[in-house]
Image (tube, rainbow, N blue to C red):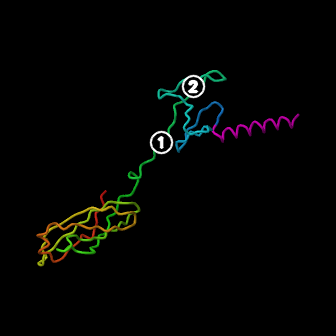
Amino acid sequence: MHTRGRRLRFTAVLALTVLTLTGFSTGRHHSHSRHGSSGGGCSSSSQDHDTSTSSGGTTHGSTNGSHRSRPTYRSTPTATSSATARPLKDGTAVLKRCASLDDPYSTVEVRNPNGREALFTVKVAYKGGNGSTLADTTSQVSVPANGRATLRMAAAGTGALDRLDHCEVDPRATADR
């Protein structure tokens, strides 16, 4: 008789453990989770057996009388990547080719030191023979994480190209924050 009591107790503990692990409980409805799944042991995640309302729940009939359900718990959204991400570092810009009358575009290579894609603003100054600035142009380019991109920038005007001696690129490509 003593063995039968142990066996019965073991079976009850085992059944309770299985029910707990599968998401069922003994009358308490705790089916919230961190990932938004129902966790209630249902075969479909789209099923919603908790018909509670935001005002504190509704009363459902059950085999042991009435059951007051609790409000449905939704997973708390985590902070967005933009809110928790580090500020962007500025990139670098290197002049690859200066504009000319034959091809009125300057070519600039922009490097992104960040671990995520970023938009950078690049500035090119068109200089005359005496070093004076004839025109400036700015343009933006999206560069992949830890990558580089080539940007072709239109010269400011053909009048400046007639007197153009050389181009100077701002070596700092400003990251748009």
Residue 100 magenta: no
Quickly name the residue at label 1: 76
Judged left or right of residue 71, residue 136 is: left
Question: Mark 1: which amino acid?
Answer: Thr
* SS at mark 1 in the image: loop
From the image, tell me which residue sits under label 2. Answer: 68
x and y percentages locating residue 177 in the rendered image: 31, 56
Q: Quadrant of residue 24?
A: top right
Residue at 29% from the left image edge and 67% from the top image edge = 151
Whole-number angstrom distance, CA of label 2 to CA of label 1: 24 Å
Residue 146 screen position, x and y as percent: 40, 66
Cβ–Cβ below 8 Å for labels 2 and 1? no
Q: Is 149 in front, or is 57? A: 149
Q: In the rendered image of this protein, does residue 89 appear above or below residue 102?
A: above
Residue 31 x, y percent position in the rendering: 58, 37
Eyeballing the image, is 177 above or below 7? below
Judged from the image, the secondary structure of the residue bearing numbered disc 2 is: strand
- The residue stretch that appears in magenta: 1-23
Badge 2 local density, few (<14 within 10 Å), some, or many (20+)? some
Quadrant in which residue 117 is drawn: bottom left
Classed neighbour count for the residue bearing mark 1: other residues with Cα under 10 Å, few (<14), some (14–19), many (≥20): few
Q: Amino acid at mark 2?
A: Arg
Magenta highlight on residue 20? yes
**Quadrant (top left/top right/bottom left/bottom right) for the N terminus:** top right
Q: Earlier in the sequence, mark 2 or mark 1?
A: 2
Residue reaching furthest to the right? 1
**Residue 107 spot, x, y in % from top left:** 26, 71
* Residue drawn at point x = 58 percent, y = 23 percent: 60
What residue is at 32 percent from the left and 66 percent from the top? 91
Counting labels gives 2
